[in-house]
Amino acid sequence: MAQIAKLENRVDIKSSPEGFYETYVRKHYLLPKLSPNVLKDVKLINGAWDSVGSVIQYSFVPQGKLSSHIDTVRVDAIDDKNKSVTCTVLDGSEAMKYYKTCSFTIQALERSEGEGSSVKAFIEYEKQNEAIPPPTKYMELAELLYKSIDAYLINIA
């Protein structure tokens, strides 16, 4: 029987946690322009970009063994104070072919060294079966996306 597992990643960036958070949470429509090597398109299916309950569809560019695919998520929580957002991947998404459940949280944090910030990401998932690998490819895509957002923010500063 599969169990809920957790995958965690932390990426150091040079931009402020506020700038990263505002771009990721409130300006999703910019993401394909900022990271065309990761995202072909982002569509708001229901709600507003920055509201709980919204449904957002991501169309990903092929990456290595990961083919072009579409995943749809629901925004479950937005915490402006802690600069975090939590989403659940919805049925019908490519990821749900492999995972019974899949949700992720992204948080922008001050770095203790005082310069720049870190993006912390958690994916909680339950595999369809034990032969399925953990969703590390999604973490790799996320890291590319975070670095693209960071580059954009540094260039407009």
Image: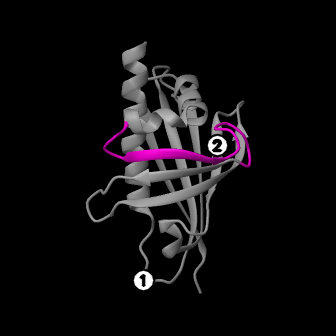
Q: Residue at x 49, y 51 (%)?
A: 58
Q: Is residue 98 visible?
A: no
Q: Is residue 51 magenta?
A: yes
Q: Residue at x 61, y 32 (%)?
A: 26
Q: Residue at x 34, y 40 (%)?
A: 36
Q: Which stretch appears magenta?
A: 35-53
Depth check, front residue: 33 or 138: 33
Against 14, residue 73 (above or below) is below
- The total of numbered circles placed on residues is 2
**Which residue has dot 1 on it?**
131
Look at label 1 and name its amino acid.
Ala
Give residue 45's position: percent from left, percent from top: 62, 50
- Give the side of residue 126 with respect to residue 66, left or right: right
Q: Is residue 29 magenta?
A: no
View extreme (top): residue: 157
Against 5, residue 29 (above or below) is above
**Which residue has dot 2 on it?**
85
Labelled disc at residue 122: none
Depth check, front residue: 33 or 129: 33
Residue neighbourhood size for the residue with mark 2, other residues' Cα within 10 Å, grouped as few (<14), some (14–19), many (≥20): many
Reading the chain from its start, which is encountered first: label 2 or label 1?
A: 2
- Give the side of residue 144 with respect to residue 114, left or right: left
Q: Secondary structure at mark 1?
A: loop
Residue neighbourhood size for the residue with mark 1, other residues' Cα within 10 Å, grouped as few (<14), some (14–19), many (≥20): few
Q: Are marks 2 and 1 in contact (CB under 8 Å)?
A: no
Against 85, residue 34 (above or below) is above
Give residue 118's position: percent from left, percent from top: 49, 34
Q: Secondary structure at mark 2?
A: strand
Look at label 2 and name its amino acid.
Val
Q: Residue at x 35, y 60 (%)?
A: 68
Give residue 141's position: percent from left, percent from top: 39, 50
